[in-house]
Amino acid sequence: MGTSSSKPAGEKFDPKKDLVDLKGKVVIVTGGNKGIGFATVSALLRANAKVYLAARNEERAKAAIESLHNAGLGKGGEHNLGEVVWLKLDLGDPREAKKAAEEFLKLETRLDVLLNSAGDMYGDGAPGSDGVSMMHIVNYISPYVFTRTLLPLLKQTAAEPGSDVRIANISSTVHTWLPAGVQYKEISDFNVRYNWRPFANYLRYGNSKLAVILWSRHLQAQLLASDPPSPITVVALHPGVVDTASHTLPFPKLMKWLFSFFLVPADEGAYNSLFAAASKKIREEPEKYRTGVYLMEKPPGTIAPPSAAAQDDKLGEDLIQLTEKFLKDIGV
């Protein structure tokens, strides 16, 4: 897949100097209690943001916040680096995702960055209680509802002079593995299991991540077509591929060493997410990034074409219509 870099060849992304100052800005990071999400939260706090760490499990979220505090991050106050707050978010149910967004709207009068980072890589594709696979619920439909509910506040913030409001949605290059013929016409299209193909689980994951790109492109076009146009930047991106499993395997030290040849640490894996959420480049060239772009991570911020299916506007329209019908049917 060809790419066209948005940064000069050889230029490295450094979050210590390449992020905008986020003092006075409010950010939500879903799935911020571990892995790339946690590393992203850490860097955004160093850029002085107030970050809502959105996660389902309170114990894990508070443990992550304690770890950040112990590192001198997120305690709030004039002499501290940023502030971190837990926001309960259960992406396993679109109703709960809507409730979480509504709770946030009671707490804040602005939202500058929404980073939909949480995701689910595992599942057999079987329909859940609402008739849709949990992978599609967690990776696409609940983030769609969460974002839709927050959109009025995002627009309000974007209307302020000098605003730099962004929505960044984590996708995956795995979407390029999908066979031809993907469609979104019936609810069953969210539940294709690909059991007749190798790596079926990855294909199910890729299908949900294709939906994320199509939704991101549609949302960007919708915002630009509104009257007046809303200057919100929407990007989909492939994150860095990080080692989150070596410690769970036999001989963890050996596995960590082997993984190091093709995976990167979580801090570095967060660079593409950080580029999307807060890089100076996007602030300096907003029109370049308000075209429904898809960002790859080598180097961070590389504008690249996604798959042909991800660029199919008709498929995107079908997806949004199906999603809205599903949400209406379950009362969301």
Image (cartoon, helix red, strand yellow):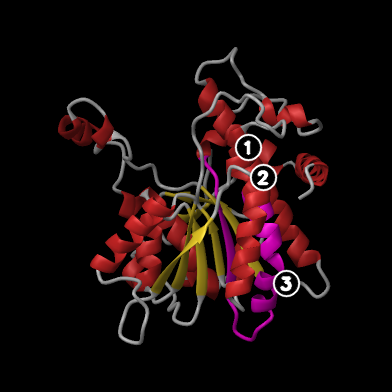
Residue 141 in view (yes/no): yes
Identity, as a three-letter code, of the amino acid under mark 1: His
Residue toward you, 226 or 205? 205
Q: Is residue 149 above or below residue 112?
A: above
* Residue 210, horizontal then vertical, whole percent: 63, 39
| Magenta stretch bounds | 143-172
The residue positioned 45% from the left and 48% from the top of the image is 239
The residue positioned 16% from the left and 30% from the top of the image is 254
Label 3, secondary structure: give it. Answer: loop
**Callout 3 environment at 10 Å: few (<14), some (14 to 19), or many (20+)?**
some
> Viewer-nearest of labels 3 and 1?
1
Picture disc at residue 136: 1
Label 1, secondary structure: give it. Answer: helix
* Residue 83, horizontal then vertical, whole percent: 40, 74
The residue positioned 24% from the left and 36% from the top of the image is 247
Left or right side of 67 for 24: right
Q: Earlier in the sequence, mark 3 or mark 1?
A: 1
Q: Earlier in the sequence, mark 2 or mark 3?
A: 2
Picture disc at residue 141: 2
